[in-house]
Image: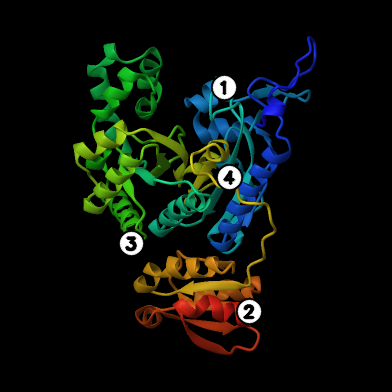
Amino acid sequence: MSKKNSSKEKKPGALLSPKGMRDILHEDFLSYQGFFEKAAEIALYYGFKPIETPILEKEGVFTSGVGLETDIVGKEMYSFSTKGKDRLALRPEGTAGIMRAYLEHGMHSLPQPVMLYYYGPFFRHEKPQKGRAREFFQFGFETIGAAEPIIDALTIKLTHLILEEVGIKNLTILINSIGDSRCRPNYIRELTAYYRKHINKICAHCRMRLKKNPLRLLDCKEAACKELAEKSPDIMGFLCEDCREHFKEVLEYLEIMQIPYFLKHTLVRGIDYYTRTVFEVVSEQEESSAENTKENTETKNTETKPSRESKEKTSAEPMLSLGGGGRYDHLARALGSRRDIPAVGSAIGVDRVLSAPGYSMPRPRIVKKPKIYFIQIGTGAKLKSFTVIEALRKVRIPLMHSINKDKLSVQLGIAERIGIPYIIILGQKEANENAVIVRNMKTRSQETVPIDKLGDYLKKHV
């Protein structure tokens, strides 16, 4: 906030903005707008479409979706009764409202997955502090209707990329899998037994969590509880085969994209709807820490159970959390759906990003509508998919895709249904030759183009 605005005279009896909330003026407003437009532009290039949900939702959207025993709902949510006796709440997070909108508007009938991005204000009644206000701003994106690990990797990639593009340095991913409803109960029993042995060492809040929501024990910020959490059982030994394989594939994609990460067994996020993959994107606050992270990332393997040394080192390093998310395959059922709908998403804390070291403010500008649909076929093509998307983004050509699909006919059908004028096809043969097929959907003519020439070709012809 500008110095001029912060030094504004406060007259006795004057009506001021509520505690933990503020006006955003002039250049400060442009800082937010510039970030939102930059993030939205990148999301658009990766195939996401915009959505805006109400700031007020029915309270049940969050009590059912986020969880009654979470701090967000139990302590921090602004909720009230209307004159008509409805129970409403100011949205404390974005995912539950977007899943509500997906169900309410029958988006299951659209080509899947449905990929949506959003931004705006959110509200939590907590003690205001640096980088955390009662009204805060987030940019987020959700992919609903896809269970494949490549979508988890896409979500992490996009979160990392947005932060990287606005100048944030020394980024790394903290990541974990918290299993699903089949394998997590066994871990909860082991975790509960561990904490019962140390019940005299945990805080009063954690004693309540032990009874009602044991997984939240790993979230506690009290020093003694954090120390116990570091030595708690590791969930990796309890994952079922499906969850273990899913997580292994996610990590393989991160390796291929050369995104640095650390496995952190205490990472569970503070919301009940998460399943399987959870992650945070952090910026290390010391240059030496960044070098250590790079060294450890290059030497680690893709085993889903890291060494105790790497976990302790990660926890000790000063880090600024800038965003995070995960998979939430059971949220739809919690909100009234008759079936589970696989989904994964992420949110970036914009207030923290704007004050983070290295942040370079993008100037607000207008983005374009996508004219290209990207189709990939086969494992080799999937592995090169991000290379094609990134090549187009760098020359400012947005696209759409269903990167989790495998069949050509399905992807072609989607492209024709939405009326995209051009498609790019990347098959096994093209992947081996580092090329793609560009097809004009109106004339049905097509041409093979090397990936490194693709941007120039499309700028000239599209």
Disc 4 element: strand
User: Quick one: quadrant of the C terminus?
Assistant: bottom right
Gap in Å between the C-alphas at discs 2 and 1?
49 Å
The quadrant in which residue 106 appears is bottom right
404 w.r.t. 430: above or below: above
Residue 132 x %, y %: 55, 28
Q: Which comes before the other along the chain, label 3 or label 2?
A: 3
Disc 4 versus disc 2: distance between alpha carbons?
30 Å
Of labels 3 and 4, earlier in sequence is 4
Of marks 4 and 1, which one's residue comes earlier in the chain?
1
- Horizontally, is 42 left or right of 179 in the view? right
Nearer-N-terminus badge (3/1): 1
Q: Residues within 10 Å of mark 2 (few under 14, many from 20)?
A: few
- Secondary element at tag 1: loop
Between disc 4 and disc 2, whose residue precedes? Answer: 4
Question: Which dot, 4 or 1, sits closer to the camera?
Answer: 1
Q: Residue furthest front?
A: 4
Q: What's the distance in space between the residues labelled 4 and 1, CA to CA?
A: 20 Å
Question: Residue at 35% of width from left, 21% of height from top?
Answer: 210
Cβ atoms under marks 4 and 2 closer than 8 Å:
no
Asked if residue 87 can be seen in this view, the reply is no
The residue singled out by tag 1 in the image is 128
Tag 4: amino acid:
Phe
Marks 4,1: beta carbons within 8 A: no
Residue 48's disc is none
Which amino acid, by three-letter code, is at mark 3? Answer: Ile
Distance from the alpha carbon under mark 3 to that under mark 2: 30 Å
Q: Secondary structure at mark 3?
A: helix
* Residue at point 23%, 28% (across, down): 231
Residue under label 4 = 139
Residue at image position (29%, 54%) is 248
